[in-house]
Image: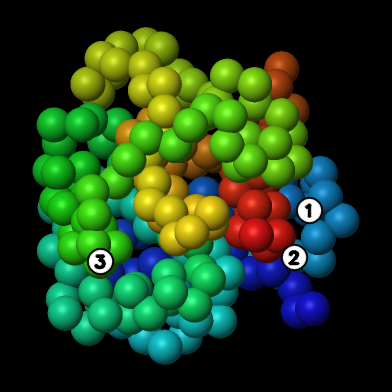
Amino acid sequence: MSAFTFATAQYDSGDWDSAPQVPANVIDAVARYTSIDVNPAGVIVPLASRDLLRYPLVYLTGHLPVRLASAERDMLRTYLGRGGLLFVDDHNHDVDGQFHKSCSHELARVVGAPLRDIPNGHALYRAFFTFPDGPPATSHELNGWGDNLVHTHLLGAMRGDRLQVLYSNKDYSSEWGYHPDNKRFLSIDNTRFAVNIVVYALTR
């Protein structure tokens, strides 16, 4: 099995590169806690490119409205149909924001149905670390920024019993957007949930 490579989706609309430090932090967490062979640097992959099919997990984020081109939509549909997992994080942490409204609409077009709550007992929350209450909260939620809500569930789309789209309004992009060396200042490493996402994508 080849080494895991963290892939960030590049799309033509919006600001796909709004969280440039997240890949290094997730890569560090996977290397730190697991025995997974992981590449030390991530890649950027255009959403309309067949290169998308090389990666079991693709991360997509941004602040601005998302309008997928037909080629991006078609390739994403193919990617999901072949077993890929798309992890989308709203960098605005705001259910009324333009990223959320536009991106969730586009994803519904791709998968053929609206995104739905993922039960907090889902296997994702036990894939490596255990999160008995479901998705960990972020400091942005707890401080009342964004939409002033603590989102108790992540959203997603299933294909059979497999999660194919994981969607977060919790702004993990800001929560994980720091240099990995700064983890030493945290009492609990807030990137541990990222490890669960990677392990789930590689084992389901």
**The disc label shown at residue 31, or none:** 1
Quarter holding the N terminus is: bottom right
Question: Dividing the picture into quarters, in which one does residue 76 lie?
Answer: bottom left
* Image position, residue 151 (x, y; %): 37, 23
Residue sticking out furthest to the front: 160
Check the image and report above or below for 80 versus 147.
below
Q: Is residue 55 left or right of residue 17?
A: right
Check the image and report above or below for 123 versus 199.
above
> Along the polypeptide, which appears first: circle 3 or circle 2?
2
The amino acid type of the residue labelled 2 equals: Val
Asked if the residues shown at circle 3 and circle 1 are in contact, with their CB atoms under 8 angstroms apart, the answer is no
Check the image and report above or below for 40 versus 189.
below
Question: Dividing the picture into quarters, in which one does residue 14 lie?
Answer: bottom left
Under tag 1, what secondary structure? helix
Asked if the residues shown at circle 1 and circle 2 are in contact, with their CB atoms under 8 angstroms apart, the answer is yes
Q: Residue at x 63, y 69 (%)?
A: 5
> Along the polypeptide, which appears first: circle 3 or circle 1?
1
Q: Is residue 173 left or right of residue 95?
A: right
How crowded is the residue under tag 3: few (<14 C-alpha within 10 Å), some, or many (20+)? Answer: some
Q: Is residue 196 left or right of residue 57?
A: right
Under tag 2, what secondary structure? loop
Q: Which marked residue is nearer to the observer: mark 3 or mark 1?
A: 3
Residue for badge 2: 38
Quarter holding the C terminus is: bottom right
**Gap in angstroms between the C-alphas marked 3 and 1:** 32 Å
Does residue 16 appear anywhere in the picture?
Answer: yes
Residue for badge 3: 110
The amino acid type of the residue labelled 3 equals: Val
Q: Residue at x 81, y 44 (%)?
A: 33
